[in-house]
Each structure stands twice: as C-alpha cells, then as structure tokens.
Image (cartoon, helix red, strand yellow):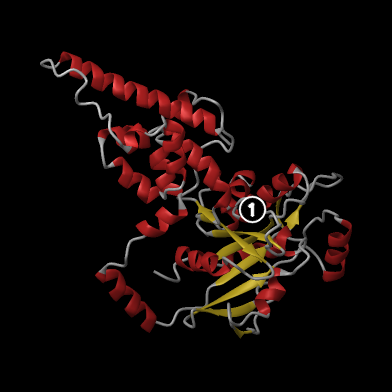
Amino acid sequence: MLRRSIVVQSLRSIRDRFFDTIRQRNEQSDGQGPGNIVTGPSLDNVPVDMQFLIMTFLSPQDLCRLGGTSTYWRSMVRDPVLWKYFLLRDMPLWQSVDHLSVPQVKLTGSAVLDDSEMQLDYMAEYLRVCPACRNQWQHQPRVFESVTSFFQSLVPVSEPQFAMFGPGLEQLEISLMNTIMCSPHVLPVAGLPQRQIDGIGSGISFKYKDQHRFNIATLYSTNRSVRERARLEHLNLRSKLFVYEEDSESNIPLSINPMFNQVCQAVNGFIFVVNAETERGTDRGWEEESAQIRVILDPAVGALSHPILVLSCVSRETADSRRIPCVTVAHQLQLGSLTNPWMVQDTAAETLTGLLDGIDWLLRHSGVML
C-alpha cells in the first residue's frame, strides 16, 4: 500500500509545476504580472494534503467530473501516483475479478514508479477494472440481441452441466453444497436426473431466475469420512480426480484421472471452490490448486474454451472475519495466464452472498444466456 505522504508529495509537485507555468506565462504577457493566478477563496488554494483528503472520499465518476472543471484539476486528477494509491487501496475490497478486468499492476506499492509502471495509465486501469465502473459500462442488449434471445427461448436446448470441485468444498467448517441444497430462495432445486457419465453421478439440477435450468456435478476428492477426518486434522489429500507421480510426497497432479475424461468433455464449464479464509495453509497449497485447474483445462481433455468460475469461499462473513481478497486469489492461482474465460467471485458458505453473480457469469460465458 502506498503511503499517503508519497501521494501528497506527488500532487504537490504537480501543483508547483502548474502554478510555475502560469506565473511564467503571466510574466511574459503584456505587463499583467501574476494577475491571472487565483488568490481568493478557491478549492485550488486549499493545501494539497486537504485536496488529497477530499479526493479520497470521491467516487471514480466524481473524480472524473472534478478533472473536467479546470486545467488545474485535470492535472491533479491525472496523477498516476494518485490512481495507483486508489487501485492498491480498493483492490482488496472488490468482490469479483475476471479475465477481462484483472489489474495489470503489482499487488504491493513502492515509493516511486519504475519505468514499466510509468508506461501504465493508472487512471484508465482503475476505471477499466473497478466493479462499479464495469457494471456501469455493461452495454444494454441491442435490438437484434433481444430478438435472438427471444427465438432461442423457443428452441429447447439440453440442460447445461458444470463440474464443481476444489478444496473449498471440503476444508471449510460449513459445507457450501449443503447450504445451496437448503436454500431454495437462492437456487431452487429443479430435479435429480437419473443419468450417469462414465459411472459418475448425474449431479443436481437447479433453476436460475425461474427460467434457466443447469446441472452441477460435484466431484469430491474422496469419500465423506476421509474428507471429514482430513478437515478436522488439517491434512492434505490427494484427489481421486488426478494422477500423481508415484513414490512422491508432492500433491502436484500430473494429469486427470482417465475415468473423469468423459466428464470434463461433457460439461459446459467448471466451478472451482477455493478456501479463502486467512487461516488456510501455506503457499504450497496455491501451487497445488493452480496445477489442478490447469490439468482440468488441458486442451487434450477437450476443455480448451470452457469457462471456469472460481468461488473464493469462506464459512461465514462477520464484522471481525477476514478473507483473502479475490484479486489475490486470482494472482496466487495464476489465472492471468489461462486462455479460458475465468472469474473469481467472493462468496460465503453460510449466506451464499455473491453466488448468483458468479452463476450469472458462468451461464453467459457458456453460451446459455445472452
């Protein structure tokens, strides 16, 4: 996190350069002297540290409006150090990030901007990735899209299926899947299809917005008793979904278990559940989870363009609880290097906050919804 003093120093240098330029122009004019410099009561003459304090309370939209009021405020609002401060301050608070909005910035702030950072327009970067701006810029469906959506609703389509897996299904005190099953006000259960894919259970069908049916097949690492014992004793399990190197203690998977190949080919996308509680294991766990995602999305398996929704999950959210920010989860899982569409969405197993936003994204990127 950038210190406030660094931002104030940067803003003060911009202010000094601005008024020095105005003063030089006035001195070169026809004897007018410094008459064009504002000396009366004005927000321009408020101390820089107070100007910065005011800007910290403004929304991105209001900051842009402030920059349009004068050349002075345009210079101040365009300061890259200012927007880097906002970016590092706000990123931990955002509840979602995806392949189109992942910030191209280091997660830590330095005292000065290096050469590579100077080339980045931090203002444009903030406005590109900020959830509030993303939501505002989402385009409304054009006429032909609405007509296409209407005709698609008249054509029966097969029920899309998604495979859900990941340590967050098994390591948390509260079971995410149990809460989903017991929350018809969030996702009503639409049925239990009596079919199997290569011996794997058919999963559970849900209805989104009373219109779109979809199926979730939950792929656990092993049987329930072993999972519960591992959770209580904080043990790392090798998942039956993957093949590991023999005679090795590493839990980095080499490939997918052949018995799950057909499942990965048949589904429309994946849901990976991450344990986002701050008390989780070491960095080794992130490496293992990143490898699991890459094995599942291996083009050889047939999941080249399948979207993957990463649910950054904690058991419960309280005033005292802390979670790993979704931007950090995306960074730790190295999602930025994937060619598949992806999204990280914060949720809580107790309340399912944010779950519907993630489901909406998944259905859209799997071609179910326009």
Place of residue 315 in the rendered image (x, y in percent of width and height, measured from the top left): 72, 64
Query: Can residue 262 be seen from the camera position used here?
Result: no
Place of residue 11 in the rendered image (x, y in percent of width and height, measured from the top left): 42, 29
Which of the 4 image quarters holds residue 80? top left
Observer-nearest residue: 296 or 327? 327
Residue plotted at (31% across, 37% down): 42
The amino acid at mark 1 is Ile
Up-down relation of residue 164 to residue 330 (above or below) = below
Residue plotted at (61% across, 82% down): 184
Rendered-image quadrant of the C terminus:
bottom left
Place of residue 248 in the rendered image (x, y in percent of width and height, measured from the top left): 84, 44
- Label 1 neighbourhood size at 10 Å, few (<14), some (14-19), many (20+)? many
- The residue singled out by tag 1 in the image is 293
Q: Is residue 94 left or right of residue 139?
A: right
Residue plotted at (36% across, 50% down): 61
Up-down relation of residue 304 to residue 76 (above or below) = below
